[in-house]
Image (spheres, rainbow, N blue to C red):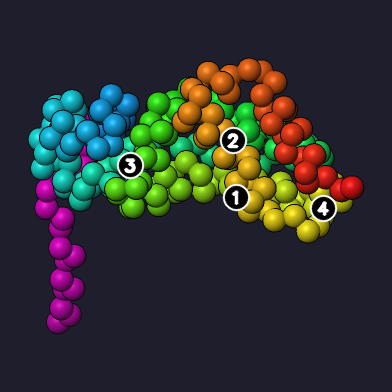
Amino acid sequence: MTETPPRAATRVGRPRSVKADRAILTATLQALVEDGYEGMSIEGVAARAGVGKTTIYRRWPGKEELVGAALSSLNQDIVVPDTGSVHDDLSQLVQEFREHTLNSPIGSVIGRLVSATISSPGLTTIFQDTILRERRAAARTVIQRGIERGELRPDIDVEIAIDLLAGVVITRILFFGVETITAPDFPDRLIDTILRGLEVA
């Protein structure tokens, strides 16, 4: 007589609601835009989303994780351009970042997130992971490819070059307003200016 193997334990509980997830993340973005990171609260997000606080805490242990999930929901796949020109590739990356910033809540919260990282260091990682990391990787690929093709000096500091790209856009948004990056020729003007210090002499 053969023994019947024991059945795997059945998971108890209702499946996670996609609708509730969407409502919570949308409410989090709204709270970020209107109240800033420091001003928002789990209670406020729950009220906006029409759910209980426990519903949020079952999904995310705290505010930093909730904000990270909300910002991640805005992420797009970053395509590394390959036009054959380092100038045009970098210009496309700047244009993509600009369009993403202008057409999502990110443009409204970048300033508040950057300032909030001073008192909440965990936000630095969230900011990097959700907004900067993939774009920096794409720019790194483009610049290194430009070096290999002889378009850029082989001795440039790649990471500082990437900082120049991101820093100009973020500085304009933070201190001068998002409208300062809306001019159609802004990406080309930015890349033209930076490449004068990177091109082969």
Residue 163 screen position, x and y as percent:
60, 46
| Sequence-wise first label, 3 or 1 | 3
Q: Residue lying at the far bottom in this picture: please name it.
A: 1
| Residue highlighted by disc 2 | 168
| Sequence-wise first label, 4 or 3 | 3
- On whether residue 16 falls in the magenta region, the answer is yes
Instruction: Please state the extent of the stretch shown in magenta in the rendering.
Output: 1-24
SS state under label 1: helix
Identified at 15% across, 31% down, the residue is 44
Q: Residue 116 bears which disc, if any? A: 3
Disc 4 versus disc 3: distance between alpha carbons? 37 Å
Q: Amino acid at mark 3?
A: Ala
Q: Residue lying at the far right in this picture: please name it.
A: 201
State the predominant SS element of the stretch in magenta: loop
| Circles 2 and 4: CB atoms closer than 8 Å | no
| Residue highlighted by disc 4 | 153
Q: Say which of marks 1 and 2 sits in front.
A: 2
Quadrant for residue 49, please give it. Answer: top left
Quadrant for residue 53, please give it. Answer: top left
- On whether residue 66 falls in the magenta region, the answer is no
| Sequence-wise first label, 2 or 4 | 4
Residue 137 appears in the rendering: yes
| Residue highlighted by disc 1 | 137
Q: Amino acid at mark 2?
A: Val
Identified at 59% across, 31% down, the residue is 96
Residue 21 appears in the rendering: no
- How crowded pointer 1 is (Cα within 10 Å; few <14, some 14-19, many 20+) is rated as some
Residue 39 screen position, x and y as percent:
22, 33
Disc 3 versus disc 1: distance between alpha carbons? 24 Å
Q: Does 157 sit left or right of 7 as displayed?
A: right
Residue 72 screen position, x and y as percent:
40, 40
